[in-house]
Amino acid sequence: MSTQDTGPSPADQPEGGPVPSPARVGTQVSEPPQVAAPPWPDRVVPTWTDRVAAQASEAFGGPWGRHAVTGRALFWTPLRIALLFTVLGLALAWAKQNPCADGNWVGSKQYTHFCYSDTVPLFGLRGLDTGQVPYLDSAMEYPVLTGGFMWLAAVLSRGYDSLAQAVGLLPTVVPVQSYYVVTCLMLSVCALLITRSVVGLAGRRPWDAAMVGLSPLLVVHAFTNWDLFAVALASLAMWAWATRHPVLAGVLIGLGTAAKLYPVLLLGVLLVLCLRAGRLRVWAGTALAAAAAWLVVNVPIALLAPENWRLFFSLNDSRPADPDTLWNIALVATDNALFDGPLDPGQSPTVLNTWVAVATLLVCAAVGWLALSAPVRPRVAQLAFLLVAGFLLVNKVWSPQYSLWLLPLAVLARPAWRSLLLWQATEAVLWVPRLLWYLGTENKGIDVQWFFLAVGVRDVAVVVLMALVVRDVWHPELDRVRRSWPGTDDPAGGILDHTADRFRLRLRLRTPRSSGPHRDQEPAPLGSSASVDRSGTLRAPSSRQGVPDQADLPGVRGDVAGGLEDDGAAGGPRHLQE
């Protein structure tokens, strides 16, 4: 980071350029030499736009200087620093998990040390310790690609064990520990791919990826299960879409769905956005590529081991409400009087399944309606976050590691440190009462009511974050991404970026003429007279007539640098938005 003063800030210059020094009467005064203004930052400066980042920067010398120059670092680029942050977060995650790595869970160590992971017990329960192939030799309750991920880790760990015994120079550990170490290393690669994808998706805001690397959620749940694998595939799919490779995006969505079902929701997001933009043909190509990739992975296993392949689907059908879901809280509160009542072992909760299906359809319909009726077409990340978060809230299963699905989406949808840290704090805290409840009161654990309280706080935090994203969609002038750089529409939009709308659901709201702006015009306080016009486009003031397009974005003041609203304070803004 260079803080060398290279000249006056552009904000210091009047509109017509520097004003010459006043000359005394009868005295010839030579003009002072003109000093070139420093180059404008080529990216959003987080310490200028986020209060938490500005306060945290005081430990390292304070916010970025007004005369500092970006882009001079040869090695420590935003990408490499974000990857370093991710490595540090993963190191903390490993330190937390290390007490459980050897599988010697005497005295309920996995609960008292808060280091439980599904990876360790399933190593033996699914025959990975004896070289069995998932689905072909043993049953597996996970989608096919996740089972393949588990099998590959087992193969690599057995290879290491054989090499360590043959060479005698490498440390030898019990098989489950080498398997867990290899699994964590593979998941760490997935986490780094997620961070890289977020940098690519963030556009002029590469520092937003630091919110992934420094995430408390990543520290707590990086190695709880194999979900980082699916999250990496989904993130790479979004990056491929953003770089205008829709077929590759479809392939990655299909592979992600073969690892975990949630990436298929991205197809729904792209469907409504492409419908609004008139790009359904491109979406169809993406959907076909996703279906083809999913079939290539699943069909061979379905043909060779149909019973084991169907286990994932049948298990999800017969599975009761997960402990930390609203459905389970309702069942416990009513003593199982709701839905199906008490269930026999293996009995499917058909009534509950119907309620969950209806609630999921309502969430999809609400997100679709928002996408088609918002004044400006929402960004891909905004809709993806809302859909996945809504799906988790109404689903009958919310395993703790599922919250990792939201991490890159939340960072891209609303890159604000304070709100994201508050939400992730509730996720991290929830892990403690969950495991203490599993421990049992007879072993100095806690009652279920404390666990339910933590679940409720987490759910409220997610709903609040969703509400903030919905507010940004309805009022795009408040969207941090769109207001932070002149002309920004959707950095992750790919073919949708700056594309004119072809279809939109129009809302007719009656507003008294004397109460404010024109009834078809919504104010956009961006420091200019930008507004949302009849076509639903956020546009700067212009005398041009006719139908505008999504490219008319946004009316940002000329003195805005990375979203800076008041450059009056030395070294940074005076007023920072949350």
Image: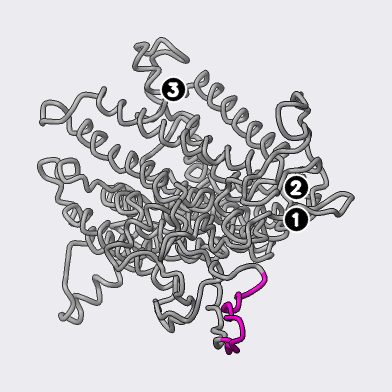
> Residue 53 location in percent, x, y?
38, 57
Depicted 381 relative to depicted 90: above or below: above
Indicate which disc, 3 or 2, sits on the residue closer to the N terminus: 3
Left/right placement of residue 501 relative to residue 250 reads right
Label drawn at residue 347? 3
The crowding category of the residue bearing disc 3, from other C-alpha atoms within 10 Å (few below 14, some 14 to 19, many at least 20), is few
**Magenta residue span:** 16-31
Q: Is residue 18 magenta?
A: yes
Residue type at mark 3: give it. Gln
Q: Residue 551's quadrant in the figure?
A: bottom right
Q: Which residue in the protein does label 2 denote? A: 537
Q: Does the magenta stretch include residue 112?
A: no
The crowding category of the residue bearing disc 2, from other C-alpha atoms within 10 Å (few below 14, some 14 to 19, many at least 20), is many
- The alpha-carbon separation of the residues under discs 3 and 2 comes to 52 Å
Q: Which residue lies furthest to the front in this view?
A: 26
**Residue 512 or residue 258, whichever sits in front:** 512
Q: Residue at x 75, y 55 (%)?
A: 552
> Residue 312 location in percent, x, y?
48, 41
> Residue 391 location in percent, x, y?
53, 36
Q: Which residue is drawn at 28% across and 39% down?
A: 429
Q: Residue 160's quadrant in the figure?
A: bottom left
Q: Which residue is drawn at 50% across and 75% down?
A: 8
